[in-house]
Image (cartoon, coloured by chain):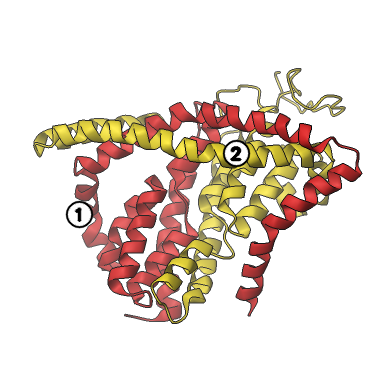
Chain colours: A yellow, B red
C-alpha cells in the first residue's frame, strides 16, 4: 500500500502540476522535500544517539527486563506472539509510557528499539510482523494524556483556559486508539496465525536462553 | 488539578530518567560511560539508515503539496465534511495531519493565531493535532529503521485510526464546548 500511495502522490503531482503550469514548482518541491528529509534526520540524530545510549545503560543494568516483567496483562494481550519476558516488551512499555506522558522526543527512540527487538523475532526481515503492526498502530493513534505542545501554543496566544482541550483530546485519543486496536485485531485475524522466528544467531543479546518454537515457525 | 499534576510528572520524568538510569546501572557495576557510547553508536547508525526512507517520503509529499493536488483533494471532500459539522477552517487538517507533522503543526498554530485560541475552530484543531499522529512519518521512521519493505496492513490501520480520530475530535468538541 505504501508503494501505491507513493507512486500515486508522484504521478498525481506531476499531472496536476502540468495541468496548472506549475511543473517547475513541482520539480523544485521534489528537491526541497529531499532536503527536508535529510534535515529531519539530522534533527533525529541527536535524539536517537542520546536516548539509545541511555537505553543501552538501562538494558545492561537489567531495567528493561524488569520493566517487561512488571508488564500489565493488557500489554501481554496486545502482543500475544511476543514472549512475555522478551526485551521487546520492556521497550514497548517504555514507548507507550513516553507517548502517554507526551514525551515525543523520547518515545521515538524507544519505539525504534522496540521495533529492533521485534525484528529479532521476525522470520522475514523485509516483511512486518503482526506485533510490529500493532506497535505501529498504537503509535500512529498516539495515545496521549497531556497534549503538551498544543497547550503551550494556546498559552502563547493568550488562551483563557489553555488546558481545557485536555478533556476533548483524551476522549478523541481514546476513541482513535480503540479503533486502531480493533482494526489491527481484525487484520491480524484475517492474515492468519502469527509467524515467529527462532531467535536468530545475530541477535544482539548474548546468552539469550529463551527458545521460541511455536507451531508453524518455519525458521 | 489532575491535569497540572500530570503535566508536572511529564516535566519531571526526563530529568529523573537521565539521572536514575546511570545511577542504578553504576550500582549494578555497569561501566556507564562506555555503555552509553556503545548504545549511542547504534543510535547514529539507526538515524543514518532512516535517511533514504524519509527523503523518499518527503519528496513525494513536497511535490504533492506544491502541485496543488492536496488543495484539490481538500476541495473535493469539503461538502462532505461541512455536512457533518466540521468547522470549515479545520478542513485542510484532515489531509495534512497524516502526511506532515511539521506542516499540520504550522497550520494549527496559524489557525489558533487568526481565529483566537479560545474559538471553537481552534479547539477542534488543537484536539485533532493532539489526538492523532503523522502516520506516514511514523511508518517511515519505525519501519525504515529496521528495513521493513512490506508494511502489510499497518498503513491501512494507521490511516483508519486517523480518520476515526479526526471525527472523534470534532464530536468531542461539540460535546464539551458546544457550538461556536
Looking at the figure, which quarter contains the N terminus of chain A? top left
Left or right, A156 with reference to A55:
left
Left or right, A60 with reference to A182:
right
Nearer the observer: mark 1 or 2; the answer is: 2
Residue B63 picture quarter: top left
Place of residue B26 in the rendered image (x, y in percent of width and height, measured from the top left): 87, 43
Residue A150 visible in image: yes
| Numbered disc 2: secondary structure | helix
Left or right, B104 with reference to A107:
left
Residue B107 picture quarter: bottom left
| Numbered disc 1: secondary structure | helix
Residue A130 picture quarter: top right
Of A36 and A92, nearer the camera is: A36
Image vertical order of residue B68 relative to residue A150, above or below: above
Looking at the figure, which quarter contains the C terminus of chain A? top right
Q: Exactly how many numbered labels are in the figure?
A: 2
Give the residue number, with chain letter if any, for mark 1: B75
Which residue is at a point 55% across and 46% down the rendered structure image?
Answer: A137
Of B113 and A178, nearer the camera is: B113
Place of residue B154 in the rendered image (x, y in percent of width and height, measured from the top left): 51, 39
Check residue A41 in the rendering and tell me which mark sits there, or answer none: none
Image vertical order of residue A119 relative to residue B110, above or below: above
What is the chain identity of the residue bearing mark 2? A
Which residue is at a point 80% across and 38% down the rendered structure image?
Answer: B32
**Around disc 2, counting alpha carbons within 10 Å, would you say few (fewer than 14), some (14 to 19), or many (20 or more)?**
many
Give the residue number, with chain letter if any, for mark 2: A48
Amino acid at each position: 500500500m505504501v508503494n501505491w500511495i507513493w507512486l500515486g502522490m508522484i504521478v498525481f503531482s506531476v499531472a496536476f502540476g502540468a495541468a496548472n503550469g506549475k511543473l517547475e514548482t513541482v520539480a523544485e518541491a521534489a528537491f526541497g522535500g529531499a532536503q527536508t528529509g535529510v534535515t529531519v534526520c539530522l534533527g533525529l540524530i541527536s535524539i536517537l544517539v542520546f536516548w539509545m545510549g541511555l537505553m543501552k545503560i538501562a538494558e545492561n543494568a537489567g531495567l528493561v527486563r524488569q520493566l517487561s516483567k512488571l508488564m500489565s496483562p493488557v500489554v501481554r494481550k496486545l502482543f500475544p506472539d511476543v514472549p512475555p519476558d522478551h526485551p521487546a516488551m520492556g521497550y514497548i512499555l517504555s514507548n507507550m509510557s513516553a507517548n502517554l506522558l507526551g514525551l515525543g522526543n523520547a518515545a521515538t527512540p524507544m519505539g525504534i528499539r522496540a521495533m529492533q527487538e521485534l525484528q529479532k523475532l521476525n522470520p522475514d526481515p523485509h516483511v512486518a510482523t503482526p506485533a510490529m503492526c500493532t506497535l505501529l498502530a498504537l503509535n500512529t493513534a498516539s495515545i496521549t494524556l497531556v497534549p503538551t505542545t498544543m497547550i503551550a501554543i494556546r498559552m502563547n496566544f493568550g488562551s483563557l483556559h489553555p488546558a481545557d482541550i485536555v478533556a476533548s483530546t483524551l476522549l478523541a485519543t481514546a476513541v482513535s486508539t480503540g479503533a486502531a486496536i480493533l482494526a489491527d485485531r481484525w487484520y491480524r485475524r484475517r492474515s492468519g496465525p502469527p509467524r515467529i522466528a527462532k531467535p536468530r544467531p545475530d541477535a544482539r543479546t548474548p546468552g539469550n536462553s529463551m527458545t521460541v518454537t511455536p507451531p508453524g515457525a518455519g525458521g | 488539578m489532575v491535569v497540572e499534576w500530570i503535566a508536572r510528572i511529564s516535566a519531571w520524568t526526563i530529568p529523573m530518567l537521565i539521572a536514575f538510569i546511570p545511577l542504578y546501572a553504576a550500582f549494578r557495576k555497569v561501566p556507564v560511560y562506555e555503555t552509553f557510547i556503545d548504545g549511542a553508536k547504534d543510535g547514529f547508525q539507526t538515524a543514518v539508515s532512516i535517511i533514504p526512507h524519509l527523503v523518499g517520503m518527503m519528496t513525494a509529499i513536497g511535490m504533492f503539496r506544491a502541485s496543488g493536488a492536496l488543495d484539490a483533494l481538500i476541495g473535493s471532500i469539503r461538502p462532505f465534511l461541512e455536512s457533518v459539522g466540521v468547522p470549515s477552517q479545520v478542513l485542510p487538517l484532515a489531509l495534512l495531519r497524516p502526511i506532515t507533522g511539521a506542516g499540520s503543526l504550522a497550520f494549527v498554530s496559524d489557525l489558533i493565531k487568526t481565529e483566537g485560541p479560545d474559538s471553537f475552530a481552534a479547539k477542534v484543531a488543537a484536539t485533532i493535532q493532539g489526538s492523532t499522529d503523522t502516520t506516514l512519518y511514523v511508518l517511515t521512521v519505525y519501519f525504515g529503521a529496521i528495513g521493513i519493505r512490506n508494511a502489510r496492513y499497518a498503513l491501512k490501520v494507521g490511516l483508519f485510526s486517523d480518520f476515526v480520530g479526526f471525527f472523534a475530535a470534532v464530536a468531542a468538541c461539540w460535546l464539551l464546548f458546544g457550538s461556536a
